[in-house]
Amino acid sequence: MKQLPKGNKKLINAWAFYDWANSVYPLVISSAIFPIFYGALTIVKNSEGKIIDDTVPFLGINFNNDSLISYVTAAAFLVVSILSPFLSGIADYVGNKKNFLKFFCYLGAVSCIGLFWFQLEFLWFGLLCYFLALVGFWSSLVFYNSYLPDIAFPDQQDKASAKGFSMGYIGSVILLILCLVMILKYEWFGFKDEGLPTRLSFVLTGIWWIGFSQYTYRYLPKGNRKARLTRNVLFNGFRELRKIWVSLKEDVQLYRYLIAFFVYSMAVQTIMLIATYFGIEELDWGGQDATTGLIVSILLIQLVAVAGAMLTSRLALKIGNIKTLIYINLIWIAICGYAYYIVTPLQFYFAAAAVGLVMGGIQALSRSTYSKMLPENAIDTASYFSFYDVSEKIGIVIGMFLYGIVAQITGSVRNSILFLVVFFIAGVFLLLRVPQKSRGERNV
């Protein structure tokens, strides 16, 4: 088939369609159905619905169930943060990056399907599938994102990126609703085992991811260069990160901001990853269906996050990015304090709405603030953002490990949530140290 030219509408749509394909992973596996399934599998309750045992034996050690999944998540993100510089170097210099995109897509999707067989008797297999699905998803994004300048001109890239985000949101919500109906009304589909639809949701996620990505692969070019994969190419990403680190030390504003971002992002990303586990283990759902309630809260977070991003951008225009980020961190502190005391679903819904409001705002504003602070003469902005992404991933690793350790030692997820307040307080302090102006022209 003849290659479509750069800027072609059909080519841009095909690229954006990968968001439709892969966004089911973070919603179904990371946020919604898998955490509920994992909680049901690893928590023993009495007849009154009270938790009597939430420990999981693994490798001869009894882990708190939340601690175990947080350690596996942290380990997967550690692998991704190490792989990312290798992969970014490959993406920039090798002409067959579509094959790399396919490989990590299939690795992640097949691993999602493998979660169908997740059971305590073969816990190592289930955790391995969870681990590889996470690595496959985040590693595929390195190559997917690197295609944007190849398929769209600069004046088209913002719109193309936004289209991908929108398609991803719509696609993932459609599959989540389908899975929710299948789980709650399993008798409609002729299922006798009420647990089967949940496990089939993991299979549908993998099939959706692989199936819809084929449209993307049909039109994407193989790559933009024809270089051999040499050692020089392989380690180029690490060299670029080192160059950025050296240049950061000469830019006080950018350096201090990145440290602040690294600290408060630890807490933000950790809360986003463990919110559902908290809802499963710490709430008294009474006669309500926990599955429906938790998925509704996740959808609520996503919807409110869009509004939060818009409101935050308007506030930043009036008072500046740094001041807005400080206020958002203060709100996060209040949310964590409130979350420590919540016990009912209604309280959880209020917390979810508040999280959505500041989650969308802090993610969007953090990235745009970083972009504003980049040196005007910076040629390789991709390397700066690679550094930004790796910093975020390492923050997730540290945050998830600390969360797991606190939960393991204290036996309570609530204590871990309260512990995260420390990072938000530190984030406020570090943001206060970021100069509002640098070299007279940058004001954030």
Image: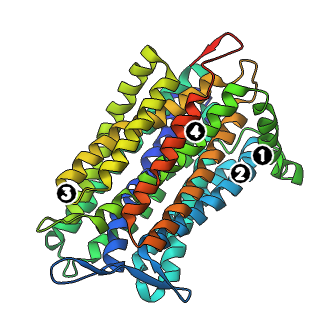
Considering depth in this image, is 392 or 168 the residue closer to the camera?
Answer: 392
Is disc 2 placed on a helix, strand or loop? helix
Number of the front mark, 2 or 4:
4
Which residue position holds label 4? Answer: 261
Which residue position holds label 2? Answer: 87
The x and y percentages for residue 205 are 40, 61
Query: Is label 3 in contact with label 4 (beta carbons under 8 Å)?
Result: no
Please give the name of the residue rendered at 72% of the width and 27% of the height, measured from the top-left corner: 252
Considering depth in this image, is 22 or 361 the residue closer to the camera?
Answer: 361
Q: Residue furthest left?
A: 287
What amino acid type is highlighted by mark number 3?
Pro
**Relative to 125, 248 lies left or right:** right
Query: Is label 2 in contact with label 1 (beta carbons under 8 Å)?
Result: yes
- Residue count near mark 2 (Cα–Cα under 10 Å), binned few <14, some 14–19, many ≥20: many
Number of the front mark, 2 or 1:
1
The x and y percentages for residue 13 are 48, 35
Number of the front mark, 4 or 1:
4
Please give the name of the residue rendered at 36% of the width and 79% of the height, measured from the top-left corner: 54
Q: Which mark is residue 237?
A: 1
Mark before the other along the chain sequence, 3 or 4 = 4
Is disc 1 placed on a helix, strand or loop? helix
In what quadrant of the picture does the N terminus appear?
top right
What amino acid type is highlighted by mark number 4?
Phe
Please give the name of the residue rendered at 48% of the width and 26% of the height, measured from the top-left corner: 159
